[in-house]
Amino acid sequence: SVGAFHLNPSSAKTEKRVNLPRNMIENSMFEEEPDVVDLGKDSTSFPVVFEPRSSRLLVRGLGENDMDEDEEDCESSARLLGMSFMNRSSATRSDSSPYTRQAPPRSCSQPSTRTMVVCVLLLVVVVSMTMALYFFTGCKFTKTGCPKPNNTTPVETVYPVSTNGELFPWAELRLPRSICPLSYNLTLAPDLDKMTFTGHTVIYMSVRHDTNYIVLHSSNLNIANATFKASNVTVLEYKPRDQIAVKFSEKLKRGQHCVLTLEYSAKLSNTYDGFYNSSYTDKNGNKRVLAATQFEPLAARKAFPCFDEPAFKATFLVKINRKSDYMTLSNMPMAKSTPLNDSLVQDEYKKTSVNMSTYLVAFIVGDFIPVTKDVSKTQVSVYSVPEKKEHTDYALDTASKLLEFYNNFFEIDYPLKKLDLVAIPDFLAGAMENWGLITFRETSLLVGKQSSPLEKQVVASVIAHELAHQWFGNLVTMSWWNDLWLNEGFATYMQYMSLQNVLPQLDMGNLFLAVRFRALDKDALNSSHAVSTDVNTEEQVEEMFDSVSYEKGASILLMLNASLPGDQQFRKGIIQYLKQFSGSNTDTDGLWNSLTQVSTQHQNVSEMMSSWTSQKGFPLVTVSRKGDQVTLTQEHFLLTSDNAMHTSSMWIIPVTYLNDSCSLAPECRQLFTLKTKTGILKVPESVKWLKLNYKNTGFYIVHYGDEGWRALTEALSANISVLTHEDRASLIHNIFALSRLGRVAFHQVINLLNYMSNETETSPVTEALLQLNRIYRLLDKRQENIVVASLKNYILNLFAPLMNKKTWGEEESVSKQELRSTLLEMACNLDEKRCIQQAKSLFKQYIESNGTSRIPGDLQRVVFTVAAQSDEGWESLLNMYGHATYDAEKRKMLEGLASTPNTRALAWILKAGLNGDIIQTQELPLVISTVCNSFSGYLFAWDFVQENWDRLIEKFPVGSFAIQTIIKSATSQFSTQRHLDQVQAFFSSLKERGSQMRSVQEALETIRLNQCWMDKNLPSLRNLL
C-alpha cells in the first residue's frame, strides 16, 4: 500500500516526498537452539511413544502442529465449497497428519546382549526425561530448554498462560496451519455516538490436520459468546500475540468442515488502525463523525476475530448496521438495505467474488457522495465529503485511464464489478489498496480546479500505486510479510511505469530517479536489511514498510527489466507470474521462476536476482583502466564497517556502460555482467572516458578513480550535453556518496559541481542542492558559523545564474515547477534578499485579496515559510489555516507554521499536532520533520519526542512508518558525541516500547556517520570554502 507507506512527491525536495506515514520462512520457536534434540530428522532412531501433550518433551520436527516447510494453502478444502484456485503442486504433501508416531515393535525374539544393553539405555533415557518433566514443576520450558535460574533476564515460556490462567495451546507468532478459513460472515453495528461497536462473526473452516484446538487472532475485542457445533465453547486469550483459542476434548479430523460463531463488542479505535473513529468540520462549522478501517498489516483482528495472516485467504460477506442519515461502503457492491427499526438500517454487501487476505477487507460508515464512470465492466467511483465533490474529477479521470491501461498491460481484467476510491478526512497512510474500496488521504486524492501540475503528480502517483496493487498484492499476495516487497516494490515500479505511458506530461522519470537515489542512501547503512528478510515479531512486520521494500524493490525491478533482451520479456514474465499464482500466495522465488520460464535466452533470473533480494546493501563498482583494458571490481558499499573489504557479499551485476564516442542514445549502451569479484572488458585506447550505469537504471554506485573522475569532470565542464541529465545527476549522487564513504576528497566534489552554472535540467540541480543542503544543516546545527557563511556564499554564487532566471508567475511544466521551487526554497532559506522580498510581496497580495489572489502551487510553501518568520505573518498564516478548505494548500500552510523561529509558537504547534483538535494528528510526523529543519527547532523537537514518547506510540504503532519518520527527523542532524550518548540512552531506556526498532539502529548509525564526516572534512572545508 501507499497504505502504510507511500512516496509523496508534493515537495520539490525529495526528502519531503514521503507521505506515509503504510516474513521469511516459517517462524520457529526452535530456530537457533543447540540444546534442543532434533528427532524429526531421524525418527527411525528415536521412536516417540510418550504422552500427554501437556507434559511432552518438545523436540524439533515433532510438535502437534509444526508448520509445513511448504505452506499449504486451502486449495482442496476451497474446492469443496466450489471456490476456484490456480494450481499449486501438492505432490510433496502428506495425506495424513505430519504428527504420526511410530508404533513399537509387536514382538521381541531372543535379543542379543548388545541389543539388551541398548534397550536398557534407551529405557533409562526415556524414564529420566519423563521423571524430569513430572517432578521438576518449578522449571518452565523455554526456547533455550530449562536453564539455571536467571534473576535478571526473564525467559519466554513455550506455552504461555491465557488471561483466565489456563495454558494457552500455541506459542508462536504465526498461526498453526491445521485450520483453514474458507469464508466469513461479518455483521457490524457501530454506534458513532458512543464510539463503540458490536460484532457477530461466523467463520466457515476446513480442518487440514487433526487437531484439538483452533487458534486465530483477536485484539481488544470483548468476546461475549462463542459457539461451535451449536454448543457454547470457552475462548482462551493470549493478549501479547493477539491470539485466541478454542480447545476440544475430541480431535477435529482432517477434511472435516466446521463453523465457529463469535459475538463481541469493542471500542472504535482512536488511533489510525483497525475500525477507527474520525471526525471533520463541515462547511457550516458542524462536527461530523465517521468510522473507517485500516487493516494492513495487523489490524483486521481489531475489528473482527479472524486468521489475520496474508496466506489465509477466504471470501467475506459483510453486513453493517447504520443510522438512516449515514451511508456505508465495503469491498463489494451492495446487495440490499433492510430497515431494522425507525432509525436503523442494515446494509448487506454481496459476498466477495474473490478470495482475499484479511488485511484487504474494508468498510466505512459516514457521509460521502460519489462521482462515477463506467470503465469496461467496472463502475469506477470517487467519494468525498459533500463540500469537496468539486475536487474529485481529476481522480476519476486518472483512475479510469489507469484501470484501462492495467487491464491491457497485465492481460487480466480487474475482477470486481466496482472500484471505489474514497477520500477520508483523517487518514494516516497515503492510501490503502483494499480490494474494490481504496482509501486515501484527502491530499492524495482530491485536486482543486486550479491545482498545480505538481499536485496532480502527487494524486496520479498514489492512484497508480494503489491500482497496481489490485493485481500485485490483491490478486497475487506474498505468503508472509518477509516478502512484502512483492506487493510494494511492484506497485511502486508500476506507478512510475504506468504514468510514463498514460500521463507522460507528469514527468515521472525525474521523480523515480530521485527516489532511487534515496533508496541507495538508506541501503548503504549497516542497519539496513535484505529486501526479503526474517520477520518474527509484530514490530518487525510494521518495520517492513520502508524504503527497502518500496523503492529498492522498485529499483531492482527496473534494473532487471533494463538488463533483459527486448522490451517485452519483463512484461511476459510478470503476466506469467500473475496467471500462475492468481488467487493465491507466493514468495520471491515464485517471481524469479516465472521470469526464468519466459526467458528467451534461457537466463537464470533467479540466480542473478537472488543476490539482490537475499542480502542487504548493494555493490560499489570501482573502475581502473590501463590502455584498452578496463578492470571492474565489486565490493559491498557499506558506510559503517571496519571490515568492508572482507565482506563476503557478492552480486551478479548487469553493468551498463558508454563512452565519449557514443553517450546519449539507448543504442550506445553496452552491457557487461559482473559475476565475480573482478571482471575485465576491452575498450579502444582512443576512448577518453567511460560512464557506467546508463541513466542510473542499476542499483549500484560507481567509483572511477582519480583519473576517471578528472576526465568526466573535464568533459562536463566543456559540454554538459555529452551525458543525459539522468547520467549527470547520477555522477553527482555517486560522488557525494563516495565522499561520505571516504573514497574521494571533498575538493573532488567541488570540482565536479563547477559545471553547475551551465546546468538547466531539474534532476542534476535538485540532487546537488539536496546534498549541499544536508551538509549546510549539519554545519549550522554545529554552529560552525564561519564555514556556514562560506558554504552559503558558495551555494548562492554557484546557482545564482539559475536562481536569477526564475519567475514567480504560473508555470505549466512539472519539471520546471520542481526546478523553480527547489531553487527558490534554497535561496529564501539562505536569506537571499530578492527571494525574501518577492515571497513577502506575494503573501501580502494574498492576504489583502482575502485569498482570491492566487499563489502558484509550487511556490506556496516557500511563500508561507518566509511569511512565518515574523510573528505577524505567523498569526496571519494560522488564521488562514483555520479557514482553508483545500487540503494540499492547507498542508503547505502547516509546513510554513512549523518553520517559525519563535519557540513559543513551535511548542504550541507540536502540542496541537499531538492533541489533534486544530491540527490533525495524522500531520504530526510532517510537523516534527519541518520543525527539525530549523536551527531554533531541532533540539526543541528532540525534547518533545522524548517527553511524549508514550503518547506517540499510542497514536502510531511501534515500528510503523510514522514512528520511523519521527525518529529519523528528530535525530538525523546530530553530529556530536554528546547527542549520540543522549539518543542511545533514551532509546535504551524504552525496553519493549521501541528500543529494538531498526530505525533506532539507523538513527545511531547516522549520528556516528555525521560525526565521522565532520571530523574528517571540517578542516578541509574551512580551507576549501
Image (spheres, rainbow, N blue to C red):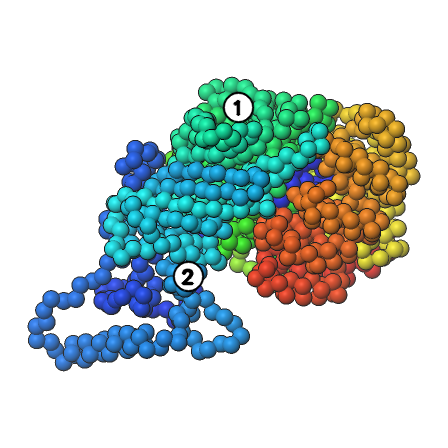
Q: Is residue 403 left or right of residue 230?
A: right
> Is 372 situated above or below 342?
above
- The amino acid sitting under disc 1 is Val
Dots 1, 2 in contact, CB < 8 A: no
- Give the residue number, with chain letter if any, for mark 1: 380
Name the residue furthest front: 342
Q: Nearer the viewer, residue 823 or 59?
A: 59
* Residue depth check, mark 1 versus mark 2: number of the one nearer the observer: 2
Tell me what residue is drawn at x 50 percent, y 42 percent: 197
Q: Position of residue 316 (x, y in %)?
A: 41, 36
Q: Residues within 10 Å of mark 2 (few under 14, many from 20)?
A: few
- Give the residue number, with chain letter if any, for mark 2: 164
Quadrant of residue 785 in the image? bottom right
> Is 205 situated above or below 100?
above
Q: Nearer the viewer, residue 420 or 571?
A: 420
Q: Residues within 10 Å of mark 1 (few under 14, many from 20)?
A: many
For the residue labelled by badge 1, is the local secondary structure a helix, a strand or a loop?
A: strand
Tell me what residue is drawn at x 41 percent, y 29 percent: 350
Q: Position of residue 334 (x, y in %)?
A: 46, 27
- The amino acid sitting under disc 2 is Asn
Q: CA distance from mark 1 to mark 2?
A: 49 Å
Tell me what residue is drawn at x 16 percent, y 66 percent: 104
Name the residue furthest left: 109
For the residue labelled by badge 2, is the local secondary structure a helix, a strand or a loop?
A: loop
Q: Position of residue 689 (x, y in %)?
A: 69, 41
Tell me what residue is drawn at x 68 percent, y 33 percent: 286
- Point out the tag, 1 or 2, that comes first from the N-terminus: 2
